[in-house]
Amino acid sequence: MDALNKLSATEAAARIAAGTLKSEALVAACLERIGQREKDVQAWAFIDSDLALAQARARDKEPRRTRLHGIPVGVKDVFDTADLPTEYGSPIYRGNRTTCDAACVAQVRELGGVILGKTVTTEFATRYPGKTRNPHNLKHTPGGSSQGSAAAVADWMVPLAFGTQTTSSVIRPAAYCGVVGYKPSFGLVNRAGLKTLSDSFDHVGTLTRTVPDAALIVEELSGGSVTPFDAVSRMKPRIGFCRTHYWSKADQPIRDALEQAVPRLERAGARVRAVDLDGEFARLVEVQISISTYEMFRALAYERTRFPELISETLMGRLLGGGGVTRTEYEEAQAIAQRCRARLADIHRDYDALLSPSAMGEAPEGLESTGEPTFGASWTVLHCPAVSVPVFQGPRGLPIGAQVTGAQGKDGPTLLCAEWVHRALG
Amino acid sequence: MDALNKLSATEAAARIAAGTLKSEALVAACLERIGQREKDVQAWAFIDSDLALAQARARDKEPRRTRLHGIPVGVKDVFDTADLPTEYGSPIYRGNRTTCDAACVAQVRELGGVILGKTVTTEFATRYPGKTRNPHNLKHTPGGSSQGSAAAVADWMVPLAFGTQTTSSVIRPAAYCGVVGYKPSFGLVNRAGLKTLSDSFDHVGTLTRTVPDAALIVEELSGGSVTPFDAVSRMKPRIGFCRTHYWSKADQPIRDALEQAVPRLERAGARVRAVDLDGEFARLVEVQISISTYEMFRALAYERTRFPELISETLMGRLLGGGGVTRTEYEEAQAIAQRCRARLADIHRDYDALLSPSAMGEAPEGLESTGEPTFGASWTVLHCPAVSVPVFQGPRGLPIGAQVTGAQGKDGPTLLCAEWVHRALG
């Protein structure tokens, strides 16, 4: 029998439904794994084993509420939790306690899930790293900002964890850690109780080991219909191979891996064509910076004005840059974003999904940087669903992801394509 | 010399700039007015006179930062404040203290403004009323949900106050209390630190006694250019008279007042044509309910599941209604909203502003209801700027507002039209 901590959420949910698995055993297995590995991986900001086990035992005594019943979930420490500290990765909030749970946390509890603990975030989900290491090689970054969630899921500590993405903070750590990162369509998961960075771009996302697990939790939270993964084996998706404007910046192994994937996808039944996102699409990385920094300057006004000495130099530089973005520049950037969203909708008449890199390369060595977010930014601006699937390995033996994106609002079909790609290349 | 508490923010700012007014004197005058009237009006949830005066004295010792320097501002008690309680109008949060200030609160402080206190809100900015009374007749509701802000501004207690609008929570209390209510274009004022109800519709707005005051604070917060109110006297605006789908529900005096205003506007130089918002526009009130309740069910999941006994029956009914909205219904409602926004943009090629009722009638008698939000809902869904100007009086001697709305993102031109209408009819 597999170690219980290695079960996917979908597998665990099936066993719980069948009465062959207790939440307490599942949670205990996760806690045991954490006990063995946390000293090295450092994925968790706060964990209270007794609290987690108490939740599990309470669920075990009840009728099953939903597919999340009894399933442990990690929560990035940018979501408020009433029963665990919430520090947002910042010394300003050392020991901070919030009065209530964020919406997605309260929903997980309502749906029967178990909040296992808070996972490490970079400073306010921006660039300045937290303590987490890449479980595949502890000398390498796990990426950011959802670094604790990605590392914990990759290291078999928890099957599901919440992340957030404002640039590439779900997709990049998923790629670096070799797990599935899912940034749903903008707004699909409720954001109440998330520490706001950029109202226009903050997305709640998930880190999981399988695509169906990502679908499971987001469907339960949003009331969406169940994605029919049984259909994947019969699919012949129309895939746009999207090198993007930043192709030349990607490491050679990434480019090689994706180029070589194309004939494999075709052999597996896909129709693959190159899609060139030209014109204003090439400006979306700068658009993302203008809009997000304008908004962050304001969203973090309290911290910026009261505790400047407790903000990292890198973040303060970005905030002050945002203070220099004029309202006119901000509105022009929003207009570009809007036009590109309309163009993307047109493109998706011909394509079920687009395939692009998840990141520049393997996870960089060193913990002082979380890597470059370039390949996530455009899809964040476009508000479309994006899924990083772990399908390649780089020359240093670290995972490389492929990013599958879809039409805004078409999360089910996009997840099906991501699963199809995962199977075809995995 | 006028009582200082009766100065508009624009007048006070000019005097502070000229060195003829100290913030301390201005704040003291506001506090004195509150001392005289609060027993009757009950506009304030929390006020700390010493704290307000200390802020004013600190600003008086410094060079002037912006037009907000030394100006007192009231803050609806749905925004977090680090130095005053934040109860969101709910017994669940009795005595609640938040760690940080909401973005707009921290920004006001950074820009030199003085946070005078927290104003009363209905329960989580929804329907269940707070304690505030209409200063024009204490037996009547001031409207909701921004009831404390509207009443405080109307009763000369403070020149500027923040409100929020998810349906009609700025426009309606402004109309009932005879002040200017301004709901800016969606997202113009940063929402970080606002208790989230409906991510798709929550707007930060303002209550003021003049249109230029509304422009002043929002321009300072957003970095927008200064609206040239000098140009108003030369304007010949193209106004669409928009009875809306709900015209027959408005009280006769409202309809009469607006119908009779048309020739006056034309004599003042406007071109006025009837605009019929037909088809899907007629569904926007139901669209607003579907989307906002779907989102509220999730945003208030913690309160709904942990403290159901401390939630009013009226709110719990709406939340549970929201739990019954399917994801498909939600997405259909969002699609209607999107199509209507595009149609409104088309309509505004021919019209600088649309004129419609702000509310069904005068403020209803009694404090158990805050009145009907119908006339605000569509403009909230449309994300466009909306301004209620106090230009009529009803048969019971209470104020009636006219609502001036503009194209999404065109806040300056819309505020100019609102000021033009205010002068033409006021």
Image (tube, coloured by chain):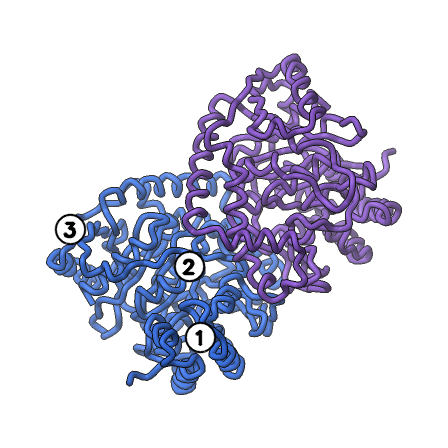
Chain colours: A purple, B blue
Looking at the rendered structure, whether the residues under marks 3 and 2 are on a common chain is answered as yes
| Residue A198 shows in this picture | yes
- Residue A97 image position (x, y, % from top left): 68, 64
Separation of residues labelled 1 and 3 (CA atoms): 40 Å
Of pointers 3 and 2, the one earlier in the residue sequence: 2
Q: Nearer the viewer, mark 1 or mark 2?
A: 1
At horizontal 69% and vertical 64% (from top left) the residue drawn is A96
- Residue contact between numbered discs 1 and 2, judged by CB atoms under 8 Å: no
- Residue B226 image position (x, y, % from top left): 35, 59
Which secondary structure lies at badge 2? Answer: strand
Which part of the image, by quadrant, shows the N terminus of chain B?
bottom left
**Above or below: residue A241 compared with residue A25:** above
Residue designated by label 3: B271
Residue under mark 3: which chain is it in? B
At horizontal 88% and vertical 46% (from top left) the residue drawn is A36
- Locate residue A1 relative to residue A239 in the image: left or right: right
Residue designated by label 1: B70
Residue B22 picture quarter: bottom left
- Locate residue A253 relative to residue A410 in the image: left or right: right
Residue designated by label 2: B165
Q: Nearer the viewer, mark 1 or mark 3?
A: 1
At horizontal 67% and vertical 38% (from top left) the residue drawn is A172
- Locate residue B211 relative to residue A350 in the image: left or right: left
For label 3, the crowd category at 10 Å Cα-Cα, with few meaning under 14, some 14 to 19 and many 20 or more, is some
**Above or below: residue A350 compared with residue B415:** above
